[in-house]
Amino acid sequence: MVRTFVALVLTVVVLGCAGSAYAMDQNAATKLARGICNDVTFWIEVPKQVYLEARDRDPLTGLTYGMVKGIGYGIMRLGEGIYDTALFLLPPYDRPLMEPEFVFEGWVEE
């Protein structure tokens, strides 16, 4: 029962993150959604940075420097999430502290 509830909550959060990532109208609700999404998904910065560094340099650099970089970016993303969640009623709504706005962006070369 608890596992089903946790899985359901995570699914709703991930789908909510994806929807707010493409929202055209920036307002307090999208800032709150961005904050909650970054609070929940900050840990994904570690495997993301390991992957990006291994892809751009080499696997050993990805495992070492990418790990450290991911931990740093994860802490910053968590801080941004807390900031956005706590101050979601205050403008500006359309200027996130970090780029990309969500952890899921920026993995694929264009």
Image: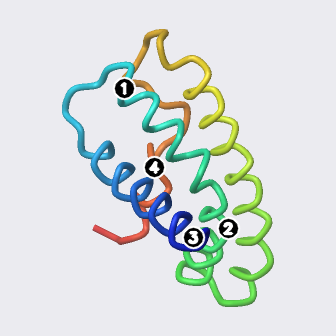
Mark 1 and mark 4 lie on one chain; the one further toward the N terminus is 1
Tag 4: Cα neighbours inside 10 Å, few (<14), some, or many (≥20)? many
Q: Is residue 84 above or below residue 69?
A: above
Element class at badge 3:
helix
Report whether 1 appears left or right of 20.
Answer: right
Residue at image mark 3: 48
- Spatial CA distance of label 1 from label 2 is 27 Å
Q: Amino acid at mark 3?
A: Lys
- Spatial CA distance of label 1 from label 4 is 15 Å
Where does the image place residue 27, in percent across and percent down from the top left? Answer: 32, 20
Residue at image mark 2: 46
Label 2 with label 3: CB-CB less than 8 Å:
yes
Mark 3 and mark 1 lie on one chain; the one further toward the N terminus is 1
- Spatial CA distance of label 4 from label 2 is 14 Å
Residue at image mark 4: 102
| Front position in the image: 65 or 78 | 78
Where does the image place residue 77, in percent across and percent down from the top left? Answer: 63, 45
Label 1 with label 4: CB-CB less than 8 Å:
no
Tag 2: Cα neighbours inside 10 Å, few (<14), some, or many (≥20)? some
Q: Is residue 30 above or below residue 58?
A: above
Residue at image mark 1: 29
Q: Residue furthest left?
A: 24
Tag 3: Cα neighbours inside 10 Å, few (<14), some, or many (≥20)? many
Q: In the rendered image, which quarter contains the N terminus?
A: bottom right
